[in-house]
Image (cartoon, helix red, strand yellow):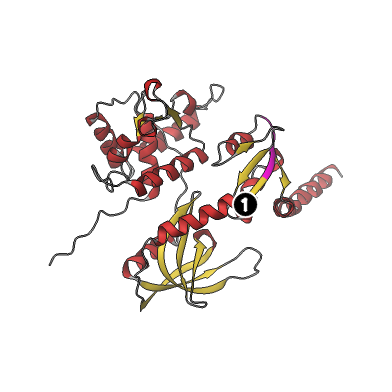
Amino acid sequence: MTETRGPAPVPVEERLFSLVLALLATEAGLTKNEILSTVQGYRQRYVFAGDNASLERQFERDKDDIRELGVPLETIEPLDESGNNQHLRYLIPKGAYDLPADISFSPEEIALLNLAAMAWREGSLSRESRHALLKLRSLGVESIEPVLGYAPRIRTREAAFDPLTDALGRRVLVRFAYLKPGDLSPRERTVAPLALVQHEGRWHITGIDQQVGEPRTFLLSRIVGPVTRTRIPFENDARGTAETALRQLDEIWAANTAVVRARPNSDAQTRLVNRRGSIRRPDGDLTLHYTDLHLLADDLSGFGPEVFVVSPPELRAAVRRRLELTVATHQPARQTAEEAGRAETA
């Protein structure tokens, strides 16, 4: 009996890139069905005249991810089919994704950008780009631009991703050092990996923590050092583990909210307004959902003085600690420069 294997999974960054590419390539937009049946990363799992509910949920999460990356994804509702979600059309307006008109580059910078463009065109995604355009043309959609020049900012996977994927396929235990927020040193975990899931643009591994004998979800970015794949096998009869993990993460995300004040017309305001679930309050403040307070503090502290945390107090304290650490880290260098300046004038 020959074992039947499903299609190899498409890396998330390829799927998101192909989605952005497809939505840039058309002025009229694409329906959900056209996207799921033709775009790389979806079409491999699409079932014609079948149940594609899980694939549709994946598309909904991907829409949120690319909007969070700053990509202006728009939805168009046909005038004669109001309320029919299946006939909504999605697109990325070219003008909204162009560089601002007041940005210019020197000849040296243009040369470097040309070199980068050449590397992009010759990269591993070029084959999938051509395939995506070919599939779109088969639908009668013509590209309005040489869209390979667009390179969206997509997060790369953590180093732990590949060894964990390998361990998932082999159904063997893994060991890794995991550093929780607030801990001074990492602790070694032995885990039976059950599913890798992406939530809010970050990868998590769900598995059975062998120390406690219970399921746990770990953030890949908090894995310190290499992942060791053991030779110890385990039985995995769990069904729907990935869906359960995503549902639990969504429940945490929905329950946790923060209120922040962003400087008008700043980069912080632009990005936070487009964050999934962001709500602009009557007073201009923004309500944000989050799954992890420390991750949100990392994001908000990166905006510096453009953001003020109104609530909760523990988030405001976490952001303040990060900003104070940044100042303390750069303080010695600033003092040295000041001392050098005083020495020159002495």
- 185 or 40: nearer the eye? 40
Above or below for 129 versus 295: above
Left or right: where 56 falls relative to 334: left
Magenta part of the protein: which range?
259-264
Label 1 residue SS: loop
Three-letter amino acid code of the residue under disc 1: Asn
Decide if residue 14 is in sight here: yes
The reply to whether the magenta stretch includes residue 232 is no
* Quadrant of the rendering where the N terminus is positioned: bottom left
| Quadrant housing residue 38 | top left
Provide the major secondary structure of the magenta segment.
strand
Decide if residue 119 is in sight here: no
In the orientation shown, which residue stands out farthest toward the left? 1
| Residue positioned 36% across, 64% down in the render | 239
Left or right: where 299 falls relative to 76: right
| Quadrant housing residue 263 | top right
- 281 or 138: nearer the eye? 281
Left or right: where 72 falls relative to 10: right
Residue position marked by numbered label 1 in the rendering: 256
- 160 or 275: nearer the eye? 275
| Residue positioned 47% across, 43% down in the render | 65
| Residue positioned 28% across, 33% down in the render | 133
* Quadrant of the rendering where the C terminus is positioned: top right
Please state the horizontal and vertical placement of residue 154, each as a whole percent of the image. Answer: 46, 44
Please state the horizontal and vertical placement of residue 236, each as a whole percent of the image. Answer: 35, 71
Left or right: where 122 falls relative to 108: left
Please state the horizontal and vertical placement of residue 74, each as a whole percent of the image. Answer: 46, 30
Please state the horizontal and vertical placement of residue 269, each as a whole percent of the image. Answer: 63, 35
Above or below for 163 versus 290: below
Q: How many marks?
A: 1
